[in-house]
Amino acid sequence: MATVSLFKYLGWLGHHRRRDRCRQATPICPQRSLPQTAHTRDGGMRPRSVDAILDDNRDILGRIKLAYGGDANAFAKEMLPVIRKYIAYVNVLSATQDSFFARPGGLARLGLETAFFALQATDSQIFAGRATISTRRQLEPRWRFGTFVAGLCAYLYRALDTVVVSDAHGTVWQPYLTPLEDWIHKHEVGSLFVRWSEARQECRSLSLFALPMILPIGTLAYLTHDGSMIAAHMLAAISGEVRYHDHNVIDHLVNRASTLVIHRDLRDADAPAGRARARAYLARFLLNAMRELVQSHQGWVPNSDRSRMWLGRDGLFLVWPNGISDVLTLLQDEGLYGLPASPADAMEILSDAGIILPMSSDESVWSIRPPGTPEPLEALKLVTPGCVLAVLHPPPVALDNDIAFNGSRAAGQTRERDSKLRQAGTTPSQAQEGCAGPEAPPDASDRQLSLPTIPPIPAVEGSAGIEPRTDGRQGKLKKVNDTKPSQPATATYALRAPIRLNPGVAKILQAIVQTLNDTTLPPACYPMVSGLFVPLDAFVARQADGKMALRALADANMLVTGPAGTEPVEYHNLHGKQLVGMVIALQFIEGLDGAGETSINSNAG
C-alpha cells in the first residue's frame, strides 16, 4: 500500500513540475515583443517547443488555413507537417541581427507570413496557361502548394549562412546535419547563444541543403507527380537560381510577398538600424533586375551605341542615373514593395551592400568616356563584371582601353582643349593624332567599334502558339496580298496603356511599339488605318506567351474586334510571310492619330 502511495506521489510531483515548466514558458506573440537588448542576448535565448511557437503564431496559421481552402483534416494532413518541420528547424532564431524580424522567433514568423501572402496571391494567377482546363484543374492545387513551400523557405538560408548557434558549453549546432530542435533535445540545451557572422554576400542556394529536413518525401512526390515543372520552379525560387527566359510565377509571387512582409516589419519598427542598412535586402532585387535587363533590353547590350552598360579594361560601369531608373521601373512593374524612392536611394543601398565601388572616399559616381560618346558620362562602377554579365553566354568582350578617368580634372581639360581647337578651326579628332596625354581620349586606331545591336528574332509561321479555328466560330480570316508597309513617319510612337492592362504585358507591348522609333532595325509591329498590327511572334521573341498577351489585351478592350462571335485575331501577308496577330485600337497608340499611318487594305478572304 505504501508502494502505491509512493508512486502516486511521484506521479503528482512530476505532473506539477511539467505544469510549472509550461507556466514558465508562457508564449509571447513575437509580433508584439520588442528586440532583445544586448544584455539579454548575453544571457542567451530560451528555446521553445514547436507547439509553443505554433501557439504564438496561431493568428497567421488561421489565415493560412483559410487561404488554403481545404477542411481542417486536409490542412492538418498536408500543410501542418511541413510547417512543424520548418519551425523545428529554425526554432526561436531571428531573421536578422538588428534589421527586419530581429526578435526571437522572427525567422519562423518571416517564413509563415511570406508563405501566407504568396499563397493568397495564387488566387489571381493562372498556372500552366497553355494546358487544357481539365489539366489546369489538376495541377493548380500542386502549384499553390509549391508556392506556399517556396514562401516558407525563402529565407531558410539565413539559418545556415549568417548565424552560429552554440550552447553554454560551446557546443556548436551543425545546421547541415540536424534541425535545431533535435540538437536542443539531444544536448539538453537550456539557452541558445547566437553569434552573427560578418556581413557578406548572401548565398540563397544553401537552403537546398536543409530542404530534405523540412519537406517530407511524400510531399516531394506529390509535387513531382506526372513530371510537371512545379518542383523545378519551386526549387529555383528558393535557391535564387531563376532563369530569366522562364516565366517563374512562383518566384514572382514569393518576391512580392517577401518585400511586403519585410517592408511592413521595418515600418512598424521604424528601422532602428538605419535606413540604408535596414533596406540592404533590396540589393538582391536591384542586382537581379540588372541581370534581367542585360538579357532582355536592347539598350542594355554592353558596349553598344547609347548603352546603359559599358565594359572596359578597367571594369563594368552602369550609366548614372538612367541605368538605375530602368532598374526601378522594372521592379515597380513587378509590383514589389518598399522600393527606393529615387536613384540616389538605390545607389545608397547598392553601396552599403558592396555591389558598387566608389570613385573616392567622398564620391560614388565615376566619370567615363566610352568610344563614340561626345561628352563624358557619369556612371557607377560595379564590384566585378561577373555580378551582372555572368548570365550572358557567350560573355561580352571588354574594350581594349580604360574608360574611366578623373572627371573633374579631365572634363575641364577636355572642354578647354575643345574650345581652343574650335577657335583655331580644327576639330578635336584632327588634333588628337598630334596630342597624346594621360587624360586624352584613346587614339583612333585603338578605338574599338561599337558592338552591333541584336536584331529581333525573325517571325516563324506557327510559332506564336495560336492556330486558326476549324470549328466554325472563327469567322472569315482577314488576309491581304503581299504588302510592303512604308517606313514609319517622323512622329514618335508610344503606348497609352490603360490602368487595367497587365503590367507585364504593358511593358512588353511598350518595347514593341518603341521599335517604330528606331529606323536602323526592322519594326516589330506595323501601323494600319484601323490601328497597330502586332504579330504574336513579337511577344514570343521577347519570351512572352502570345495567347496570354492576347487575352490580357482583349480583357482591357484594347483590340479592334471583328464581327460578333469572332476572335480578335487577324492574318496578314507581310514581307512574304503570313503573320498572325492582333490590331491595337488607335486611341491606345500615341503617334497614330495624325498622319503617317500605313494603309494596309485587309480584304476578307
Image (spheres, rainbow, N blue to C red):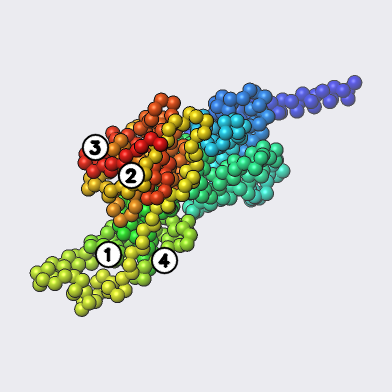
Q: Which residue is mark 2?
A: 526
On residue 372, the disc is 1
Disc 1 versus disc 2: nearer the observer? 2
Q: Which tag, 1 or 3, sits closer to the chain's start? A: 1
* Residue type, mark 4 in image: Val
Do the numbered discs 1 and 4 sit on residues whose CB atoms are within 8 Å?
Answer: no
Q: Secondary structure at mark 4?
A: loop
Mark 4: give few (<14), some (14-19) or many (20+) Cα within 10 Å. Answer: few
Q: Residue at x 57, y 33 (%)?
A: 132
Disc 3 versus disc 4: nearer the observer? 3
Q: Which tag, 2 or 3, sits closer to the chain's start? A: 2
* Residue type, mark 2 in image: Tyr
Query: Where's residue 481, x and y in %?
Result: 37, 44
Q: Which residue is mark 3?
A: 593
Query: Where's residue 231, x and y in %?
Result: 61, 42
Query: Where's residue 69, x and y in %?
Result: 58, 25
Disc 1 versus disc 3: nearer the observer? 3
Disc 2 versus disc 3: nearer the observer? 2
Please identify the quadrant where the N terminus is shown.
Answer: top right
Q: Is residue 575 above or below residue 112?
A: below
Q: Secondary structure at mark 3?
A: loop
> Number of numbered discs present?
4
Q: Is residue 336 visible?
A: no
